[in-house]
Amino acid sequence: MDQKRLLTSAVGCLAAVLMLSSCGPIPNSVHSIKELSSNTLFTPFSGRSPKHLDPTSSYSSDETPFTYSIYEPLYQYHYLKRPYQLIPRTAAAVPAPIFLDKEGNVLPEDAPADKVALSIYEIPIKKGILFAPHPAFAKDEKGNYVNHHLSEEVTKKLRNPLDLPNKGTRELVAEDYVYAIKRLTNPRIISPIYGTIVSHLPGLEKLAAQVREYDKQLRANLPASQRDLPFLDLRKFELEGVSAPESHLLRIEVKGKYPQFPNWLAMTFFAPIPWEAEAFYAQRGMAKNNLSLNYWPVGTGPYQLVESIENRRHVMQRNPLFRKTELYPCEGEPGDKEKGYLEDCGKPLPFIDRIEISAEKESVPLRTKFLQGYYDSPQIERLDNGQGFLIGMADSKEKEEEYKNKKLQFPKVIEDHNTYFGFNWLDPVIGEGATPEQKEKNRKLRQAIAIAMDWEEYIQIFEKGLATPAHGPLPPGLFGHNPEGSAGFNPYVYNKLEDGTVIRKSLEEAKTLLAEAGYPDGRNLKTGKPLVLSLDFQAAASPGTKAVLDWYQKQFAKLGIQLDIRATDYNRFQDKV
């Protein structure tokens, strides 16, 4: 989005700086006049710094402002068109797959899924795309990598890899995508999509076994606690069904007919990874200083991370080698032109030179600073911040007048997502269960809890009525949601009356299930001891979360179950999951 249209409060002094450079420092400003007059986006983050900036393992929304700005998957979504439309990013096109039957015969595009044995994607890669300058690519006049054999004297003092004087680049090639897909099998990296994608890529499971064995050999004589590990070079292995037959052509074979596969290629799990970056970060002393792809990404995107102070500040700066051919779209949805969304048609991207993301622990100071002009956005990765402002405007005429005077804009959009409670499937009490009898008892316990959790009440109290209870994993608005069918009604938690009204099952029904599970009134039928369950919560306990956590405990208490809440910061929560 063009900087001139960023959601921000108007600061008259800033305008004077741009025109006359005669304005003094803004009182109590955290930014200098030079910073405020630059083409910089200032925005905060809450909690702790992002945990995973390695695209193979990154899956959390607080990481996406970094990963999707630094890395480039093959595809992206059109910025303005709805429903979302896949378009090329580093790919030169979004080709249709070639379908083959069991005998290897080519099938028509509309072939039924049960006839398709293999889908082949041949994806051309744009030429001339360069990686952002990085020490991993630097070579001497003989073509040798100058930063791949650094002494520990150098690495133990290094905090920012860009501090090394020699940097280089090279062109993006299809092999970088092959290498990235191979990394899904790396036992040193936990990729959240491996369990899903392994059933679709023919050779992935076999490669995973080979890589695990090779990793064991590399670690054979090393202490289990050692962080510096020898470079696990995946170029040594072939991945059946994934190859680069030409320097700028990627070929991927997918089992059967899997229409969703191109959507995976728009995610950073399939972003290119240069082997040089892994070799560079595998040097002794790097891990101790958190020098890895998790902290210092290497990509071809419009930005590169140039400063990273954990839990304090992260700065992304325009990639000086980013191509000039990426342009703002000239078409969108009906009405976009009238809204001004097409005013920047054909302008090179990105519009902003620098993005500074600073830590803000508390919501009240964050909002105050935003209203005073310290931040251009109250939180860049969240779409729901505007709800709080809208509620404030509805409750206070003064706030409504203030927000209008500051020219704050609140464009509305429906965001499709789910909030849910997850049960640990390995837990002997609420998980799957080891025997048929235990499985049935555990299922009834989970069902009793699901009934007792009054999400209708939660929505009214904590979401201000701006949500709806889920009856299945697909929320309204997503393809596949059927409000009239079984997916639109959960018979385990709700009853449907003759007139079609859906109501939550009674607490008595939940208590009956609880007794059948072996816990009448929340006590173990055999021992008489109270049932205590633990909830790992994804935020540290604070005044802001206390009301929610108290509400959770009250829901379990309705069944006589004691809920032990183990609140933690989000990074630690990701480790537990």
Image: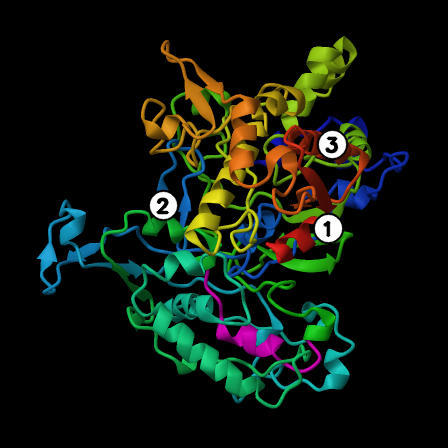
Residue 52 occupies which quadrant of the picture?
A: bottom right
- x 67%, y 77%: residue: 227
Residue located beneath label 1 in the image: 48
Secondary structure under badge 3?
helix
Q: Amino acid at mark 2?
A: Ile
Residues at marks 3 and 1 touching, judged by CB atoms closer than 8 Å: no
Alpha carbon distance from label 3 to label 2? 46 Å
Placement of 208 over or under 451, stated as above or below: below
Q: Which residue is mark 2?
A: 87
Q: Earlier in the sequence, mark 3 or mark 2?
A: 2
At x 72%, y 49%, the residue is 569
Q: Nearer the viewer, mark 3 or mark 1?
A: 3
Can see residue 268? yes
The answer to which of 575 and 87 lies nearer the viewer is: 575
Horizontal side of residue 442 vs 533, given as left or right: left
What is the C-alpha distance between the residues marked 1 and 2?
33 Å
First reached walking from the N terminus: tag 3 or tag 1: 1
Q: Position of residue 125 (x, y in %)?
A: 35, 61
Quadrant of image for the C terminus = bottom right
Residue bearing the label numbered 3: 550
Q: Is residue 300 above or below residue 492?
A: below
Depicted 464 relative to depicted 320: above or below: above
Tell me the magenta residue range. Answer: 271-286
* Nearer to us: label 3 or label 2: 3
